[in-house]
Image (cartoon, rainbow, N blue to C red):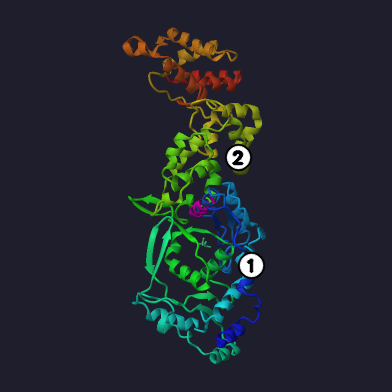
Amino acid sequence: MEENKKLAQLLFDNIDKTPEYYEELFPKRDLKEGAKVCRFSPSPTGFLHFGNLFTCFVSYSLAKSSNGVFYVRVEDTDQKRSVEGAIEVMLKGLSVYGIVPDEGVIGDREEKGSYGPYYQSDRKEIYQTFAKSLVEQGLAYPCFMTPEELEECRASQENESIKGIWGQYAKCREMSFDKIKERIDNGDSWTLRLKSPGTLDGKCYFDDMIKGKIEMPENVQDIVLLKSDGIPTYHFAHAIDDHLMRTTHVVRGDEWISSAPIHLQLFKVLGFRAPKYVHVAPIMKEENGGKRKLSKRKDPEAAVTYYIEQGYPSESVNEYMMTLANSNFEDWRRMNKDEALSKFPFNVKKMSVSGALFDIAKLSDVSKNVVSKMNAQKVFDLSYEWAKEYDNELASLYEKDTERTKAILNIDRENKKPRKDIAKWSDIKDYISYMFDETFEPCFELSGNANAALAVDVLKKYKDVVNLSDDKDTWFSRIKDLCAEVGCTPNVKEYKADPEAFRGHVGDVSTIIRVALTGRVNTPDLFSITALLGEEIVQKRIDMAIKHYEEVK
Ligand code: GLU
């Protein structure tokens, strides 16, 4: 024992604190029964993968639905992967989706909360304090194996099922104090390794909240706790941080599940109570009849910036993430159309074990629904905000007459059955293009019984009767009256009973007018469109269409 103490002092003479000091500094949180403490702990790579956002969303929802705490910790121990400004980009990405940490890192080098520091690079002393204590107890040791020796070991283990430094490969495990001192005095570099108490027939059991009961072989590897620069590995930092920050539920990607035996062993060796694990499967994508992970390299929609640039409202992305997270969400939504998403009883246990399937068409449907429920002012505000950043042309169209723009966006909105045409703000320019001369693209293609000859007759008459001060009923009765004058019937049933007797019906007449005014056979309410286009444009477009149809009839 004395030897161990001496060794600990030799290795960590800079450390004068004890684990008890930190236990007291970061006491158990005073939270209501059942409140969960969850975290998001990104490495500062600057890239926010949709899968990371999803995992974070799950973590956040779990904390919030229990009135708990959600915090952000930055895992910046791998300096090679750190990218300047990355944290701000990531936090901004999260805040777009309403994920604002209660605690932890809230900006670049900015943090709040009393369980910090929340940048791992600022916690060196804490890790070393616990490392020192492990050495004192004979549970960790310095390892002087060189990269060449490690490589040799790797090569010789090619056909073995257990890899890494264990058993006979753990060359420095039993090194005497004198030998260690000699190597250190010699300036040899060392890492700190766990003296794993695992045995080959030992088992590790845990109950993952998504994956269920898991049994795996116990860890036998003397894994690295501190690298040669004194910086901890992910494993060691995870155990120390999630313990001292009093995380109750560790929500993370399921690529970590294979390391869980290491982590559970570390919690045990350190004398900590292990948190609950929630291992989230990656978001999958269908491809050639099979499934694969949503990929940063292959799929533009793997980047969270994609949704922002395309202008998917954050509400839509959140709704969509909930459909991915809990398959019963859609039923709940149908029954609770106007409830806030936060009212949904999110249940982590109902998450997919193998990975939810990403489907952009589904996101689009979800989003069309969300947008259809927004009022015109909200659609205007959000899409204008987006346009200022991503589509100057749309922003300038909006600015020509903002009240008119809002009225355009209000067509067939704010009623019981709003139209569902807009999934993302980048859909809007095309959707309303005919409302502005700058973006209107005439197209004279007709459908149904409408043809050029009928179009000339209809439009000539319509030009004379159209009156923008009419109310909707008067406007429509004028169109119906016009039908008889051009050999059509205002009554579709009558037409169907004897199609030979007519050139078409009121639907065909409306199509002709619609196409002349908008260049499309399908639009929202034509009366509102006509009114908002204004006398001058209406007359101009009718003239243009008459000219076209006269030439081709
Ligand atoms: N920094 C780790 C990663 O980015 C986090 C894993 C965890 O949540 O524990 O994969």
Q: Residue furthest front?
A: 33
Per the model, the C-alpha gap separating discs 2 and 1 is 51 Å
Quadrant of the frame with the N terminus: bottom right
The range drawn in magenta is 50-60
Q: Is mark 2 within 8 Å of ligand 1?
A: no
Left or right of 231, for residue 483: left
Residue 462 in percent (x, y) is at 51, 13
Who is closer to the viewer here, 230 or 349?
A: 349
- Would you say residue 75 sits in the magenta stretch? no
Query: What residue did someone put label 1 on?
Result: 24
Who is closer to the viewer here, 12 or 397?
A: 12
Task: Say which residue appears at 50% left-offset and 83% top-offset.
Answer: 146
Magenta stretch, main secondary structure class? helix
Q: Which mark is residue 387?
A: 2
Q: Quadrant of residue 533?
A: top right
Q: Quadrant of residue 41?
A: bottom right
